Amino acid sequence: MTIASYILGIAAAMLALGVVTEMLRRRRLRERHAIWWIIAGVLALVIGVFPQVLIWTAAAVGVEVPTNLVFFVSLFILFLVCIQQSAELTELEGKTRALAEYSALLANRVTQLETATHRADAGDTP
Amino acid sequence: MTTLLKHTLIVMPALNEEESVAAVVDEVYSKLPGISVLVVDDGSTDRTAERARLAGATVISLPFNLGVGGAMRVGFKYALAHDFQNVVQVDSDGQHDPSGVAMLVDALDSADVVVGARFAGEGDYSVKGPRRWAMIVLATIISSLAATKLTDTTSGFRATGPRAVRLFAEHYPAEYLGDTIESLVIAARAGCTIRQLPVSMRPRAGGVPSHNPFKAAAYLGRAGMALMIALMRPRVPLATEVTSS
Ligand SMILES: Nc1nc2c(ncn2[C@@H]2O[C@H](COP(=O)(O)OP(=O)(O)OP(=O)(O)O)[C@@H](O)[C@H]2O)c(=O)[nH]1
Ligand SMILES: [Mg+2]
């Protein structure tokens, strides 16, 4: 590994962590969405700084080419994030629907009340 | 009743508390006659709203669950809209003794937020294990931030004065654990004075506790993260007296 690629690895991990932290700070990202990115960023940083960790882990789990382990873990994390987002989307759709129902029912009640008061004002209530 | 209590709104967040909510509302009215009570029913699937309404409380039912923080925000907004000066949060599971409310509200003379602390010598409520350690660490950090000694930063039993009500109506956090920890950080950094008074805490009157003992260890990590993020965030200024949004 050249010194340049070593530095590139560390810089990329730091950049990822920096972006996530800044988004959190500005409330553009909620904690529970940030957690996977933080885990991924920290892993990338650890491996960037100590490449031996990757080689040892790859040997320990029996992966012959260490970079394959990187691809596997990255894909796995991306998969988890995607699943989480789909779940959140489903939940949000449900909430929007609930809100629409709620406001439609409210609008209906308001109309009924308005008609009732109009009648009362006109004096033709029984 | 003191005039202070007349301008005070009791906000009770409630999620599936049909067994205890009516008794708590009754107790509040009997110990603090004439006070206003708002129960924020947060998408309960049982008869919480009905029981609370029968007991005489004003009830706001949210169409779905927003969490304690979200429910309290509604409470603060309601307080602003109806010209209440102070807000006191009282849990609807019966753990907070309403006789402590008057004392908390009186202390608002000299503070913006008064926390009723559970481990300050009164009563026999106790928590063990990681949740306990987390509470100690949190208390130490937030104490230094607020420049006052706080021992129980996760207590929901608190009174909020006019300045803090205006702040919280806009900035009360709805994130998990945000309603207790981050709200104190926001208040302290906005320049609010925080005080703590000892209160006694009782066991729940019914229903199920929201904290699963198995999740106690995860609590430590999440609380730490919540605090770290709260500290990183830019501070929010206190609104000046004139603005009323
Ligand atoms: N609005 C709202 N209220 C909630 C929610 N979860 C819990 N609550 C209420 O918040 C209060 C405190 O909840 P508890 O489950 O007693 O939590 P705790 O007092 O911190 O913990 P325990 O020691 O287990 O009692 C109770 O009045 C609950 O009804 C929620 O999602 N939304
Ligand atoms: Mg409780």
Image (spheres, coloured by chain):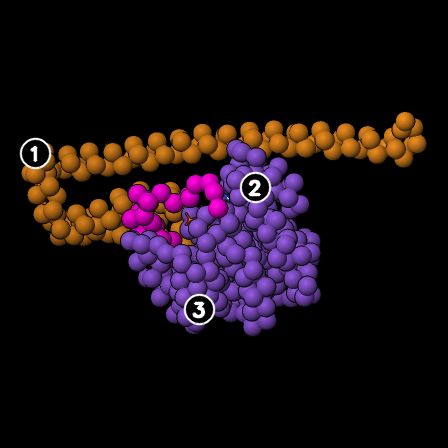
- Numbered badge on residue B41: 2
CA gap, disc 3 and disc 1: 52 Å
The residue type indicated by label 3 comes to: Ala
Residue contact at pointers 3 and 1, CB within 8 angstroms: no
Instruction: Give the vertical position of B138 relative to B68 (above or below).
Output: below
- In the image, taking residue B33 as reference, residue A115 lies left or right, namely right
CA gap, disc 2 and disc 3: 31 Å
Residue at (64% x, 53% y) in the render:
B29
| Camera sees residue B158 | yes
CA gap, disc 1 and disc 2: 54 Å
Mark 1 highlights which residue?
Answer: A62
Q: Nearer the viewer, residue A60 or B122?
A: B122
What color was chain B assigned in the picture?
A: purple
Say which chain tag 1 marks: A
Judging by colour alone, the chain drawn in orange in this rendered image is A
Q: Residue furthest right?
A: A123
